[in-house]
Amino acid sequence: MEKQNTKHRGLGALDIFIILALLAVIAGVGIRAYVNSSDRNGEIATQEDYVVSFQVLDIRDSSNERHMHEGDKFYLKDSGVYFGTLLETNTVRAAEAFYEMPDGTIFKGVNTGSGDHYRVDVEADILAQGMLDQTGAFLLGGNTYLGMNKEIQIYSKYLSITVKITGIAKAS
């Protein structure tokens, strides 16, 4: 019996097709990266410092005193994206509470609890990095929309809270 020589010579049509497909994928990824790195005018989008004001309703006063200090870093709970750094002193007011009177009527008044039962409403500011898009909407980190009255969950090293955005202004 004779041995047959089965060596392949040159590239086949399938080999050429695979190489061309890989080159097309690489070119597509490069074009997508270039388009995403620049805005519609062809300029690189720059982020600036903004002061994002927010309100936290009905939080334990002890949580506020222990875990909300100037310089604390906060992140978005759903994505882990860096939200910003807490600024200066918070504005703290006693939270409103609903009380049922002996006659069954409901009365809304200031929370009079003590210790961990004493609840407060807190207003605070965070220094965040972001930009305004073409419509004037604020984009945290250039891609996460934040708007007035939007409620978001944020967290720091020791605290997880839901906040309501009350203002966004360019830092001075």
Image: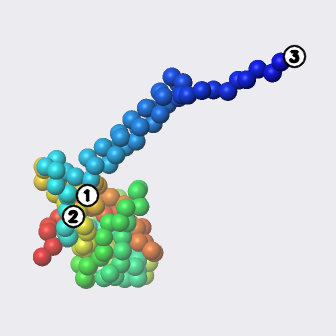
Q: Quadrant of residue 65?
A: bottom left
| Mark 2: amino acid | Gln
Q: Which amino acid does label 1 sit on?
A: Gly
Could you say whether the residue bearing mark 3 is in a helix, strand or loop?
loop
Residue at left offset 40%, top offset 79%: 67
Residue at horizontal 48 percent and vertical 28 percent from the top: 16
Task: Kindly identify which residue carries mark 1.
Answer: 142
x and y, in percent, of residue 113 in the image: 38, 77
* Label 2: how many Cα within 10 Å (few below 14, some 14–19, many 20+): some
Q: Identify which amino acid the numbered label 3 is placed on.
A: Met
* Residue closest to the eye, 127 or 112: 127
User: Mark 3 sits on what residue?
Assistant: 1
Residue position for label 2: 47
- Gap between marks 2 and 3 measured at Cα: 76 Å
Toward the viewer: 145 or 91? 145
Q: Is residue 15 visible?
A: yes
Coordinates of residue 26 in the picture (x, y in percent): 40, 42
Foreground mark, 2 or 3, reads 3
Instruction: Inspect this view and state whether residue 113 appears.
Output: no
The first of marks 2 and 1 along the sequence is: 2
Residues at badges 2 and 1 in contact (C-beta under 8 Å)?
yes
Across and down, in percent, residue 12 comes to 54, 24
Residue 55 location, quadrant: bottom left
Q: How is the model colour-coded?
A: rainbow
Answer few, some or many: residues within 10 Å of disc 1's Cα (few below 14, many 20 plus, some between 14 and 19). Answer: some
Tell me if mark 3 has few (under 14), some (14-19) or many (20+) residues whose alpha carbon lies within 10 angstroms of its own: few
Q: Position of residue 130 (x, y in %)?
A: 23, 63
- Secondary structure under tag 1 reads loop
In the image, residue 129 sits, relative to residue 19, either above or below, namely below
Mark 2 secondary-structure assignment: loop
